[in-house]
Image (cartoon, coloured by chain):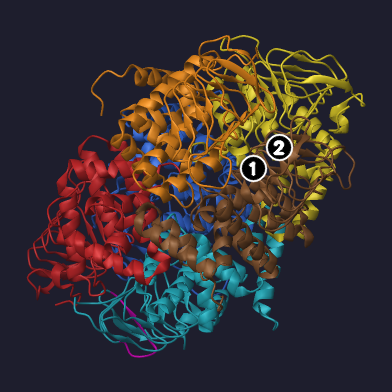
Chain colours: A red, B cyan, C blue, D brown, E yellow, F orange
Amino acid sequence: MSFQPDPLWQSIRDEVERAARQEPLLASFLHMTVLRHACFEDMLAFHLSSKLACNVMDGRALYELLCEGFDADPHLADAARADLTACFDRDPACDAYSTPLLYFKGYHALQSYRVTHWLWNAGRVSLALFLQNRVSESMGVDIHPAARFGRGILLDHATGFVAGETAVVGDNVSILQGVTLGGTGKECGDRHPKIGAGVLLGAGAKVLGNIRIGEGVKVGAGSVVLDDVPPHVTVAGVPARIVGQSAEDMPALEMNHKLG
Amino acid sequence: MSFQPDPLWQSIRDEVERAARQEPLLASFLHMTVLRHACFEDMLAFHLSSKLACNVMDGRALYELLCEGFDADPHLADAARADLTACFDRDPACDAYSTPLLYFKGYHALQSYRVTHWLWNAGRVSLALFLQNRVSESMGVDIHPAARFGRGILLDHATGFVAGETAVVGDNVSILQGVTLGGTGKECGDRHPKIGAGVLLGAGAKVLGNIRIGEGVKVGAGSVVLDDVPPHVTVAGVPARIVGQSAEDMPALEMNHKLG
Amino acid sequence: MSFQPDPLWQSIRDEVERAARQEPLLASFLHMTVLRHACFEDMLAFHLSSKLACNVMDGRALYELLCEGFDADPHLADAARADLTACFDRDPACDAYSTPLLYFKGYHALQSYRVTHWLWNAGRVSLALFLQNRVSESMGVDIHPAARFGRGILLDHATGFVAGETAVVGDNVSILQGVTLGGTGKECGDRHPKIGAGVLLGAGAKVLGNIRIGEGVKVGAGSVVLDDVPPHVTVAGVPARIVGQSAEDMPALEMNHKLG
Amino acid sequence: MSFQPDPLWQSIRDEVERAARQEPLLASFLHMTVLRHACFEDMLAFHLSSKLACNVMDGRALYELLCEGFDADPHLADAARADLTACFDRDPACDAYSTPLLYFKGYHALQSYRVTHWLWNAGRVSLALFLQNRVSESMGVDIHPAARFGRGILLDHATGFVAGETAVVGDNVSILQGVTLGGTGKECGDRHPKIGAGVLLGAGAKVLGNIRIGEGVKVGAGSVVLDDVPPHVTVAGVPARIVGQSAEDMPALEMNHKLG
Amino acid sequence: MSFQPDPLWQSIRDEVERAARQEPLLASFLHMTVLRHACFEDMLAFHLSSKLACNVMDGRALYELLCEGFDADPHLADAARADLTACFDRDPACDAYSTPLLYFKGYHALQSYRVTHWLWNAGRVSLALFLQNRVSESMGVDIHPAARFGRGILLDHATGFVAGETAVVGDNVSILQGVTLGGTGKECGDRHPKIGAGVLLGAGAKVLGNIRIGEGVKVGAGSVVLDDVPPHVTVAGVPARIVGQSAEDMPALEMNHKLG
Amino acid sequence: MSFQPDPLWQSIRDEVERAARQEPLLASFLHMTVLRHACFEDMLAFHLSSKLACNVMDGRALYELLCEGFDADPHLADAARADLTACFDRDPACDAYSTPLLYFKGYHALQSYRVTHWLWNAGRVSLALFLQNRVSESMGVDIHPAARFGRGILLDHATGFVAGETAVVGDNVSILQGVTLGGTGKECGDRHPKIGAGVLLGAGAKVLGNIRIGEGVKVGAGSVVLDDVPPHVTVAGVPARIVGQSAEDMPALEMNHKLG
């Protein structure tokens, strides 16, 4: 239980209390999932366990596991808070913290991945793969548990996102639906992209191989990137070429998908 | 209950009765979902509630809500009928009305969106967002409840389709899997595409920003459209350029994905 | 029950027994799904029925059906074994047979499709369509039951894959996420691609119309292919053009996504 | 929807609103089951459908059926209200209307029986038998759908209560757990007891054959009654004998289990 | 599959087909549970697995187990048929074979016990105890797996029936609800009653200790029997005494609960 | 987590590990329910939550509540251990601690009641009544949350047991199926029996009113007790009379149901 003031959790509770009063059909769900919990972490663990439980994985066992994860590694919840703020700040269709928290599958998939990453590092490989599969089935997002993601990530709409075993994503990156951070070749080893801080990856962009996408790069929708990209440029096309300097310092924060 | 003759509903019942006789393993499902209902609207509400119910949303409450929607706004069912005819007319793999009605998730997602649109307009924002999430999870389709869609829409295969808050889609449009009608920038306001009547959007096409795609345009598969497109042309490429006049008046009706 | 030695099944059991000992939270699932079964076929039927059962399709009835399929047509299980070996050989992130078997939805979708193909050929069209829909909902993969697939197929990550009614895929093909093997036009008849043996289809590639992709071709990520492609070349771009000879004889086996 | 004032329904809502505020763990259930409904009848139909649904009987279909019953025959709800008042008045452990309504399986079983009786009279014999079985399984109460019960019945604790096809129970009867109103012989026809108004049937009492138990009789716990009993006496023993006059005019209302 | 004519199975199918046509709400259940099965044994195994499956015991695994039992020991199904005929012949409220088969929990409990007996004899003690518990929970009947029961048993209404480890019940016995065949003392060994053929045990009768109840005895409702009873007499009372000769040769067949 | 040696928990684990190895069909359940837990209390909370969860009460929320109860009041688990030992010592059909723990609904009902008693005393009346109802539905046992029970209680077979609001049961009592500890009259206040230590209540015995059953009394099966009973006698009959001295000092420990 948290004894310090927690303004984010308080905002979420206020929003959800309003919603529960206004929408009787959701009152049940909102009480069970949010209002009866003591802190943000318990609430998130409960909600993710509702999403990931299935006929072969008991919801109670999963909830315990997720609570254990948030307890064991405080970075999980810190990142979950930073990702939530990223959704709120960058998505104009999102005017409440509780909206992505409760209803954006990109947010759920990312926090679920963070738990698989903790399991993977703890040597619980089978369980990490089991949950990766559940996330892929129920959210259409396939992030390898060994991939490394920074904080403040927006995974928008999310369907079809794939990130491979040795992919690395820096802080404050925004990723649209249908993006692939894929490997090349069938040998083991470091074979997936490294995405710099503040990068914006447009819808359907494919970034393939152990290449570096520099800080503040904008990758146009539908582009296929096969080579390193220097910082603060815009790339587009199949295959992608540099089409200009980024108009913004951190394109991920502006979400401007215009090229050039 | 409908006292007028309803030939579409009668055709569906006939098809389903045949199927129930031929396939014992489906007889249960077909009786429960179709044959015991008095009209098309009840049947559709029941089927969608089967698809969208989950461990935190009771199927009975959802079925009541959907019936309430079809009752309150007859345009919902009118559009559902027009969309069904569109599937039947345009998809060569579809030789019965009951096939898309029962088994095409693009059809289910579109009708579910229509209900979220009714809820959104009625000020029931939380419930609309809850159901948008359910559609995204269970069908891989993410249509913002505030988006506006005409009638006679074919959403084929559907996985990965995204349409943003201010997107507008005209009548008789055909949309293949993986299409994005996305916004640009992080400011609120009108920021998504306007798609003219009869447009064909090929697989994986991305249309971004508050741009107009004229009537009868064909957008090639995998294209990325960032600018207005005049009526009755074909565009293709990343970024998309005009590659010819549409060979058809309404490409959506012909489903010819050849370019030029 | 199989009385001959079955080394693949024995390897799977050994891997799973180790995992069950190491991960108590999965012991339940692993015992129920794998260890208590007498042979590979029963195990696979059980696992797929867990994935495809829903509130309108009883898991017991589905399990019976899948067992009946594997029994009636031994090619189903032969192909399932060849596909499993393909995952193991070509995916560097996969170091155990049980990993794709239990956790890769591309593998599950492909084996489910194989059962729908058997049903379709047996004239059980409604049931085939029902299950096609379940696969599309729960795995984001939409393969028409009438499509024809060879053996040794890798369907990697899988979200968004679509293959139409008259598509044909040769042996030893590798297919990444977001690929479309689509038709063109609204007339019935042969209208989908024919993919040669050993072809590699990169992430998000769209191949449209009744065209032939020759043996050993590599199709770059994000490409849109609208014309025949001769054997052993690499094609890329929107629309796709030949950009070189394949460096590998069978690109599907090497999974090298570099162009040229 | 009811436009007249309905003080019972208002009392129930007030009690339940208080409970929902005091007990977060029940808020979900209380909102879904009680507070979101427009009238007593809908609420009761919903709650009974939660109790009786099972893996072969869809909750939505059952809820529809129960609403249809309460609509078609207003006596069902009238009796349900009278029975509720009986619980409130006679059971000292019950200090709120919502307690038996929500939590007493004797009350649930009796109202479920009333629906089976309506179905039986409407010729829907199979469905009546199906639900009789569900009540027997989930509440341990076995009342034949053809039996006839008056109003103001208290079925206290209820486990093991059995009433046969031609049993008749008058108004304002109180029945404790383990009571049997059984037939004798294997011939069809009128073969079960007729219980007069105001009778108190003690725990475990067996009343067998087509006999009359007069108005205001008290049957002691554990008694076996095989012969007619005149009004306003107390019977006890195995077999039962008259042991005195009833001290109360209507023993059912006083619930005094003392003999003599 | 059975190739011999099976008139009982044919009668059941005919009755169920009629019911499915008359009652749409049950058509689903009747198709899934009865009509799609090839023989009586499969149908019964399926129906019992619906009753006994729970959140910790998969319905598929249970169905397999029950099929295995009926296959391994043909006496199970022979007895199930004889018990069904007993219900039909002796219960005047039962005018179709399918009624007890589908809807009488006494019948379901007895057939479930027969499977636990087979498991117990095969040394699968834990599984037998697990299922005994499921029967006790879902039907209120507690028969120890080691008890021995003959054929042609009617277990009417059934709630509260208990039979201990060394109880033996002969052929053609009729047992009403609330009966106990109990042990006495805390030592192991033979300590439960032996019930002769054709005995009728009235509602709530308790028979305790290693005593013999002779052939054709009638035990009055609510009686407590603590000593041996010679054949063809009627006993009644607490404790039970001989009150007359049985008017019938086999009271179980006549179901006459009158004493003397 | 418990760091002291806990021989009972160790015995249970050993028994369950053996059972899991011998019975593959239960391995799933036994791992999930017993083997993965750190202590007796967690295991018991998990198992009871499996039994009591339902479509309106989430298993996770219930499991949390039960853990909270065992944590807040260590007497709950102490009594649960003493009751388990009572089953083991007094029931000759029980040769392992894990048998009643996992499979005896009387044991489950008693431990569930103990939790409702804790809730009742903490003022959480609605939740206590909700769970009382769940126990009554799923186990056929109806114990008022305000009743008071000592330790070392055996509730054997259990179907139909009822204990009222002001009932008190001393230590080391044995209670057979169908027993009622009932009130009399409709006034509030102390109106249920007080059962002394070591009492044996035979099957179907009814004890009614605010009377005292002295220490070491044996109440014969089927008896109806309406008056105080002095210590160490045997009572039997309807109504019950003293029929002798108890042959045993503590009849509950000997389970000898012979009279006199």
Which chain is mark 1 on?
D
Q: Nearer the viewer, residue A161 or E138?
A: E138
Tell me if residue B235 is in the magenta stretch: yes
The correct choice, above or below, for A244 with respect to F51 in the image is below
Q: For residue D41, which quarter of the picture?
A: bottom right
Mark 1 and mark 2: span between their CA atoms?
A: 8 Å
The correct choice, above or below, for C23 with respect to A90 in the image is above
Q: Do labels 1 and 2 share a chain?
A: yes
Look at the image and tell me whether residue B104 can be seen.
Answer: no
Q: In which quarter of the image is the N terminus of chain F?
A: top left
Amino acid at dot 1: Leu
Left or right of D246 in this view: C12? left
Q: Nearer the viewer, residue C43 or B255?
A: C43
Tell me if residue D249 is in the magenta stretch: no
**Which residue lies under the disc numbered 2?**
D205
For label 1, the SS is: loop
| x then y, percent, for residue D87 | 58, 53
Q: Which of A197 and E119 is in front in this view?
A: E119
Amino acid at dot 2: Ala
State which region is magenta. Answer: B229-237
**Which residue lies under the disc numbered 1?**
D176
Q: Quadrant of the C terminus of chain F?
A: top right
| x then y, percent, for residue C131 | 54, 54
> Callout 1: few (<14), some (14-19), or many (20+) C-alpha neighbours within 10 Å?
many
For label 2, the SS is: loop
Residue F61 marker: none
Tag 2 or tag 1, which sits nearer the N-term?
Answer: 1
Look at the image and tell me whether residue C249 can be seen.
Answer: yes
